[in-house]
Image (tube, grey):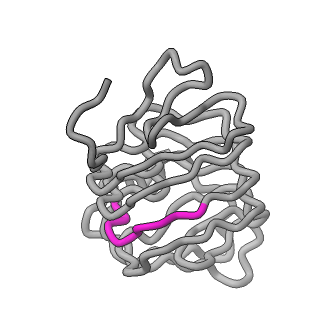
Amino acid sequence: SSAFCSCLKLETVEIGKSVKHIGLSAFSSCDNIESLTVDENNKSYISEDGALLDMAKTKVIRYSSKSTRTEYNMPDSVTEIGEDAFSGSIYLEKITLSDNLEKISIGAFGDCSSLKSIAIPEKVTRILCYDFLDCSSLEEITVDKNNTTYSAVNGVLFNKNRTKLLKYPEAKSTKSYA
């Protein structure tokens, strides 16, 4: 856990063929990663489109935060986004989440300063505090109408019953809120 946490000068990560386990928050706050590669003979992990995933492509572990890509389309097999997985990805404006996504771990999108909107799929049942911290361009959060845990009203994230406001987008254009 947290093996490379806060290694601000780390720019390149190469996962060798013998790596079998990467702990929680292994690359948290490593906001200068330009390249994440995995040896083609590794049986546990894969690198695809700038993201480090488990071999089954069910979990996004880390995205190359300094990638200059503006969009990321998550594989439909992904059910979980790991802690701080996209944090510091300053160029990403759009992230299309997997329809099968269930869990968004803490800090998943922190400091994604160009992210403008995000659509929460139907199956998501876990969003934690700080998931959208410092998303200074975030204007709107939408939630699939069939989601049983969350809802959104005018781009603002709530629990399903709308008794708890979870996230008011930082760049929302309205000058007042009632």
* Residue furthest to the top: 163
| Nearer the observer, 88 or 143 | 143
Query: In the rendered image, which quarter is residue 41 located in?
Result: bottom right
**The image quarter in which residue 68 lies:** bottom left
The extreme left residue here reads 175
- Residue 86 versus residue 13 in the image, above or below: above
Name the side, left or right, on which 143 lies relative to 33: right
Residue at image position (37%, 49%) is 110
Q: How many marks?
A: 0
Q: State yes or no: residue 91 in magenta.
A: yes
Residue drawn at (77%, 61%), measured in percent from left and top?
Answer: 77
Q: Position of residue 175 (x, y in %)?
A: 20, 39
Please provide percent x and percent y for residue 59. 67, 55
In the rendered structure, the answer to whether residue 145 lies left or right of residue 107 reads right
In the rendered image of this protein, does residue 162 appear above or below residue 28?
above
| Quadrant of the image containing the C terminus | top left
Is 120 on the left-hand or right-hand side of 108?
right
Dividing the picture into quadrants, the one containing residue 117 is bottom left
**Chief secondary structure of the magenta span?**
loop
The span shown in magenta is: 88-96
In-front residue for pair 137/91 = 137
Question: Which x, y percent locates residue 174?
Answer: 27, 42
Q: Measured along the vertical axis of the image, is residue 2 above or below residue 153?
A: below
Q: Nearer the viewer, residue 29 or 105?
A: 105
Residue 133 magenta: no
Task: Determine the residue positioned at 48% across, 46% down.
Answer: 141
Q: Residue at x 70, y 67 (%)?
A: 75
Residue 12: x and y, percent? 40, 78
